[in-house]
Every structure is written in C-alpha cells, then in structure tokens.
Image (spheres, rainbow, N blue to C red):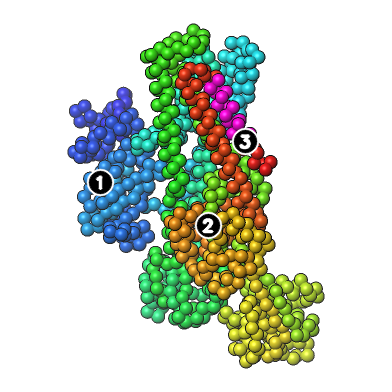
Amino acid sequence: MSKVKCNHCHLEFDDSVMIKEETLNFCCKGCQGVFHLLQDQNLDSFYDKLGNKTIQPPLVASSDLNKFDTQSFEKIYITLNPEGYKQVDLIIEGIHCAACIWLNEKVLFNTDGIIDATINFTNNKAKIVWDSDKIALSQIIEKIRSIGYNAYAYNSKIADEKASRAKRDYFIRMMVAVFATMNIMMLSVAKYTGFFTGITPEVKHLIHIGEFILSTPVLFYSGWIFYKGAYYGLKNRILNMDFLVSSGASFTYIYSLFILFGAKGESYFDSVSMIITFVLVGKYLEVLGKKSAIDTLDTIKSQIPLETTIIKDGKRVEVAVEDIKIGDIVELKTGDKACVDGIIISGESSFDESSISGESIPIYKKADDIIFSGTLNQDSLVQYRVTKTFKDSTLNSIVTLLEDSLASKPKIEHKANEISKGFSVGILSLSVLTFFVWYYLGIDLGFDYDGVNHFEKSFIVAISVIVIACPCALALATPIASLIGISELAKKGLLFKEAKFIEELARATKLVVDKTGTVTNGKLSVVKVKIMDENIHKLNLLYSLLDSSSHPISLSVKEYLAKNYKDLVIKNLSDIKTVQAKGMRALYKNIDGKEFEILGGNQKLMEEFGIRYKFDSQNSVYLFAINKRVIATFELKDEIKEFASEFVANSINNGIDVIMLTGDNENVAKQVAKRVGIKTVVANINPIQKAQYINKLKSEGHTVIMAGDGVNDSVALSSANVSVAMGNGADISIAVSDIVLLNNSLKSLNEAFIISRKTYKFIKQNLSISLIYNLVTIPLAMAGFVIPLVAALSMSLSSLLVVANSLRIKGK
C-alpha cells in the first residue's frame, strides 16, 4: 500500500485511509477543515513558510472550554491592563518553528475582539489582550485549537519542567563539545608542529580525518542551538551573535572539507570546535540562570497558604485564598500564616514578620494593628478583617514585582546584540567584498598559492578574512579575565552567579545595604547584665524558664547563662504561660512545698503583674523576677559586624555612596549607621518601598549594588543592577541574588569590589588587544598576505595574548 502526505500536517499515511478531494489528500476531518480555513482567510502562505516540516493534526474540540470563562480561572490567571482590557498569558502547545508562530499571530490578529497577541518564539508563551464584550477567552482558545494547536494557562510548574529540560539538553551538548575539543586540540598540536618541522601528506591527511570526525558532532549537534538562534533571528530581522558564530564556524568547516577532499592547504576543524565550545559554555550559564529564577519564584510562592479559615454566619469555613473578599473575617491560630492583609478586630499576639521586614524579633500586634500576608502568628488566636484581596496582598505583590524584575532584560544585553549585529554584518560584508574583488579583478600580489585555481584562491582569501576575524579573541576577552577574577573571588568566599556582574560591581556608584544580618550580625547578644542575687538556685529557675521559650531574646539570654555559669540545671516548672508579646510566667515548688512565682520578659510584663521597676535603655531588655522582686536584668542588641566601618570607609573612598535601607525603626537604624559611618538612612520601609527606592536611583543613572540577607530583601535585590546575599541569609534572597557572600564577611565583600575593579580593567585591556589585532590583521588578510593557516595561528596567538594578560590578575 503506497503512502501519501496529508496536505495540511504533511504526515504520511496509507493512501486508503486518506480523505480525497481532487488533488488534495487529508488524514482527517480536522486537517481538511484547517486547510480550507486558511484558504478562506488568505493564510495559505503558511505552507510555504512551513516547507517540508510536519505538524500535529488539529485537536478534536474538547468539552473543557467552559473552564476558561469561569470566575475562579479569571481570579488566578486573568488581569486587567491599564486600558481596561483583559490580559492572559498562555502556553501554545504544538509550536515548533517560526511558521507556527506566524500562523497563530495572524489568526489571532484577524479575530474580532483581540486587541493584541504576541508570541515569544523562545518559550511559546503568548500574551493575549482582548475585549471581553466582543469575545470570550474560551472562543480564543477554540480558535487556536481550530488551526491545529492547543493553549493553556501559563504556570510555573510547566515553565520549570521546560527549564529543566533545557538545562539537561545544554549540558549534554556542552559536554560533547568539551570532550571533542580537548581531543581535537591534541591532534592540532601535532599538525601545527609538523608544519614547521615537516610532516608527510599521508599523516597530515589522517589528522584531517580525525579532526573532521571530532568536529562534525560539535558543529551539528552541540552547535545546533546557534543555527536555531540564527534562523529565528533572521526570521525576526535580527543579526545576533548566534548568526556570527554559526556562519563563521560553517564557512570554516566548508573550507576544511575542501582541504579534506583534495584541495591544497590546511584544514581548520579545530577552529570550528573552539568557536562552538567557548560560546556554548556561556549559553549554558544563561540557562542555569533562567532555571534558578523559576526555582526562586516557586520558593516564594510556596510561602503563601493555599487556604485559610474565615468566619461566615458564625461558622468557621475553609476557603481558597483566591476566594477571600475584602471585609471577610479571617481567623488565625498559633502557627498559622496570614495569606492576605487585614486589621485585627479581636485578640493579640506576636507576629514573626521576618519574611516582610527582615527583623527577627517578633512584633506585638493588638486590635486595630495591621497584619501583612506572609507573617506568622506565634502566640495566640486572633481574628482580623481583610483589607486587601489575595492579588493585592503584600506577599503576592512581592511575587509579582519579582516576576517582572526577573523577566526584564538588562540594557547591557541589548547593547551586546547591537554590537554583535554590527560585527557580524561588517565581517561578512568584508569577506564577500574580498571574494568578489579577488575573483573579478584578478588581484594577484604574488603570493604563492601552490597551483590553486582562481576561484579557490578568491575563496581562500575570503575565508581567511572570516577565520582571522573569528570571534575567539573577542569572545575570550571578557570570559577569560572574568573566569580568573571569579576564581580569585571564590577564594575570598564570594560566589558570582554570572561573570557579567563583575563589570557592574566595578562601575558601581551606589551601594544599598540592609541593616539586620548585613551591617549587623543579625543575632541579639547580651551586652550588659545586672544580677542582684547570684544564688545558684535562683539562676536555675531563670535558666529553666528560658529553656521553656523559643523567643530570640530568651535564647540569647539562655546562651549567655550557659556560657558564664557551668553548673546550671533544669528545674520542673508548673503552670507555664506565655503572655503575648511580653514574656512568660511560671510557678515552682521547692522540696519544702514553698511556691515561687517567676516572671521573665519586658517591662510591660512586670507592670502587668504589679511590679514597678524603672529601667531605661536603648536596647532590647529582659527582666527576671521572683515573687514580685526583680533579681536580674539583661540588655541585648544586634552587634555591628567586624570590618563594617572599614568596608563603608573604603567604599566611600572609591566614590561609592553607601545607603542603609531597613524595615527597623529609625532610631535604632541611625545608631547603627552612625557607628559604621553611613550618612544616608531610610528606615521603616517595606520590601516594595525598598525596590521603589532602588528603581529611583537607577532611573537617575546610578549603578546600584544591593546587599541583604532576608526574604524581605528579595524584591530589592532583584531590582538592583547587582544583588549580594549574605551566605547565612534566607534561601530566597540567595536564590535571587547575583553574588552570594559564602562566609558572611564584609571583608570579603570589600575584596569583591577590589578584584572586580581590577578584573574590569583587564577586560578593557583584552578588548583593546582584540580590537588592535582585528584592525591590523583583517586588512592583511583582505590583501591576500595571510593564508588560512596563518590566520588560524594568528587567531590562536591573539587568544593566547588575551589569556596571558588575564593571568596577570592573580599577580597584582
């Protein structure tokens, strides 16, 4: 039975099962319907763009379309744009080439009611804006399905799976390239050595064959992503770095094939392999960054509860966070996290706001105080009235801002694309011009081409221009210096996620620091103690009470006692009670049956139990009393980090303005800032305000570096040009940061600035070497003075100069 192709999907089937229509053949009703739909809408040029590629037949319309118009779907996935139109992000399934993107965009744009439809060709993510009065989302999905594709709402799980696949694919391609390049360079050493010392044609031919075998999978498997990127770039009228890499490698490969199959000269399969491998390593780092960004968003979103308890008609009801409305009464038990913002109407408790403010000390909240989403109720049951929906709540707003920040492209990326575009056009134009000048004008400067004919001579000279200007030295100029700089930084306890942050760090004009955990240690320490009665039995009672609490202040006092009193033991206390945001109360009976009331906490606790004890301090205070008598006082504060003052002074001396942004109160923040020499302090601000402050600095033209350690710093960190996370900080801040300070030392951060400035200086020197090299060698190659062998050796020499210059970073 003969097989024929379907006129729509191009898949082959037995002739007997096809739906025939004069000269047309269709594998199913779906393909037949789509074919005529495209004909009727004058979109049949889709098949010209598709070429010989195959696509999946159209899906049979399913009954799940109604879900796209439900309120629950709208609450989660649909937003309103500033013009009042609805907007949704969709993943369009089945897209695998530019023709598919063209078809979907054309069909959507021609659909009445759709305002905008753009599809990202790198991830198949479509942003669709429509007028809900004219068309429903289900009709849009149905339209997409009618032309053979499927669409579903974008969510992070799908993006994560795709990012994981991309990471795995890039890693395999990179390892193939690295393995082949290492082996091909060993053969190249023998070939180049033989050029000067003598080598038989037979041995040279065998080396060419070996290089061909090794370089072919590098070019066509490892380098496939560059061909793909160049193709999509050309489809979108962009000449990118992928185009330069793929064209340079391809022409060099083609010329080397000429040599392999009998032409005179030297092959340059090694250059092909080197070009692909060097650039592919950089691509892999980019993929790792994208995967890390998706992981970061998932981590932050996981902090938001999916359900909560509301009081409705006097009954407790579990509802999804998307269904909570303004005015609802939410009940929070001890250990529950708030999922939306609101105002307390009954109860009082301490709240851990470290996810929002970054401060480790719980905040006492009572009636009429504001509760923020993402904060943890530590003490007792409270009820609060909702003031913001889930979409507008504080933690969800942080997630949204972080998504926008991670999705935005830095200016340096756009500049790099423009530079590579000019470089690509310039080199290829010069190469083509050189070929035609030599071929048609017959220029002959007397160079001996050993019998090569006129066409091959012109081709060799043109190839020499591409090879000698091949981007190896240019590509190495930044990464080699950066790699050495990064290795030096790693020795100082600094992890740079991407090399490009060295440049930003070197050009910094503003350094924004958080207080807690960045300038200070982030841990309360006992700084002043007064014990009126050091009776070991009474200290045992204090130690036992502290052992019953997990409050940061209690833990610090307990640590102090354990360090200074070696013989303390835990006593059996009874009736232990936590007094919200004030401290603890317990009872103790000795062997004689005498009962003691013991109290430990702040002054408000003492006052509540009738103890009047005046105690003034700028620090956090812990008082301990037995039977209404205070017998010990402890003052605690967050200590300044070692080297903090020197770090601030060094930054200022290098022209960097240091600013402290903190959610802590202004008095405490100014005290810390004064001690370390920071003049500008902005206190009492939330994470979103931090990010807004940094964006304001950036809008004024500053290069902003942000250092922080808490979840609350995640938005601000992602907004800065370069973000630095303390190694002992929250996982989220580490994930969104560009630099991780592994040893948590400001001395290491100071070294980061020093080494970055040094590395940046050598990067500029390397670029100058590359520029001078191209200015000198390209004209020589165009004039025919440089054969491809010398071009390749010259290119290698320029690379060696760049590497040797970069190694000087270690010695300075």
Q: CA distance from mark 2 to mark 1?
A: 45 Å
Q: Residue at x 61, y 69 (%)?
A: 674
In-image side of 654 versus 716 (left or right): right
Give the residue pinned by disc 1: 109
- Point out the tag, 2 or 1, that comes first from the N-terminus: 1
Residue at (64, 18) in percent of width and height: 193
The quadrant holding residue 544 is: bottom right
Q: Is residue 714 magenta?
A: no
Task: Name the residue tied to disc 2.
Answer: 510
Q: Residue at x 59, y 34 (%)?
A: 802
The secondary element bearing badge 3 is classed as helix
Which one is in front in this view, the residue at disc 2 or the one at disc 1?
2
Q: Are marks 2 and 3 in contact (CB under 8 Å)?
A: no
Q: Nearer the viewer, residue 499 or 101?
A: 499
Q: Is residue 45 left or right of residue 127?
A: left
Residue, x 46% and y 45% (percent of image)?
412
Dot 1, how many residues are within 10 Å of its Cα: few (below 14), some (14-19), or many (20+)?
some
Residue type at the position of mark 3: Asn
Q: Which residue is mark 3?
A: 805
Q: Quadrant of the C terminus?
A: top right
Query: Dot 1: what SS?
Result: helix
Taking the image as shown, residue 87 lies to the left or right of residue 191, namely left
Q: Is residue 609 above or below residue 503?
A: below
Question: Disc 1 marks which amino acid?
Answer: Phe
Where residue 748 appears, x then y in whole percent? 65, 54
Residue 421: image location, x then y, percent: 41, 35
Which numbered disc flags the more N-terminal residue, 2 or 3? Answer: 2
**Which residues fall within the magenta stretch?**
790-805
How many numbered discs, if any? 3
